[in-house]
Image (cartoon, rainbow, N blue to C red):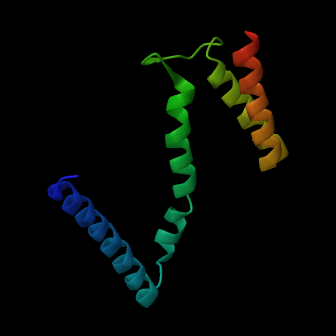
Amino acid sequence: MRAEVVLLILGMGAVTYATRVTSFAVLRLTGMPAWLRRAVRYVPVGVLVALILPTLLIQDDTLALHLGNHYLVAGVFTALVAWKTRNVAVTVGLGLAAVFVLSFTGL
């Protein structure tokens, strides 16, 4: 591996580490403001949506809003299960089962 690549990776790691340590240190000294605490609560949901929605909505580089999109159908089913049961294990299990049934049985 070239020295420039190694130095670049180490530099990016150092900058990332420094920004995180600095922000944690400042928040430890000053405390987290209420508006920031409210905003941070939504970060996990936002990240999850950003990771999942493209898989559910896009097939072959086009928007696929039809019943032939098995991932979308399974995703809507899984969202309903999550809403109704509020149980992570049941939601994951039934969601995986829905993807399996729709994808491999040709429904």
Residue positioned 77% across, 20% down in the render? 101
Quick check: 83 above or below 45?
Answer: above
Residue positioned 52% across, 71% down in the render? 37
Residue positioned 45% across, 86% down in the render? 28
Q: How many marks?
A: 0
User: In which image quadrant can residue 56 be found?
Assistant: top right
Quick check: 16 above or below 32?
Answer: above
Residue at the far bottom in the pictured view? 29
Q: Is residue 86 visible?
A: no
Residue positioned 74% across, 24% down in the render? 100
User: In which image quadrant can residue 102 be found?
Assistant: top right
Question: In this view of the protein, which residue sits in the foreground, 11 or 6?
Answer: 6
Question: In this view of the protein, which residue sits in the foreground, 81 or 101?
Answer: 101
Q: Position of residue 55 (x, y in %)?
A: 53, 29
Quick check: 10 above or below 98?
Answer: below
72 left or right of 12?
Answer: right
43 left or right of 14?
Answer: right
User: In which image quadrant can residue 99 be found?
Assistant: top right
Q: Is residue 82 visible?
A: yes
The quarter of the image holding the C terminus is: top right
Q: Position of residue 29 (x, y in %)?
A: 42, 90
Q: Position of residue 75 (x, y in %)?
A: 67, 30
Quick check: 92 above or below 9?
Answer: above
Residue at the far front in the pictured view? 1
47 left or right of 78?
Answer: left
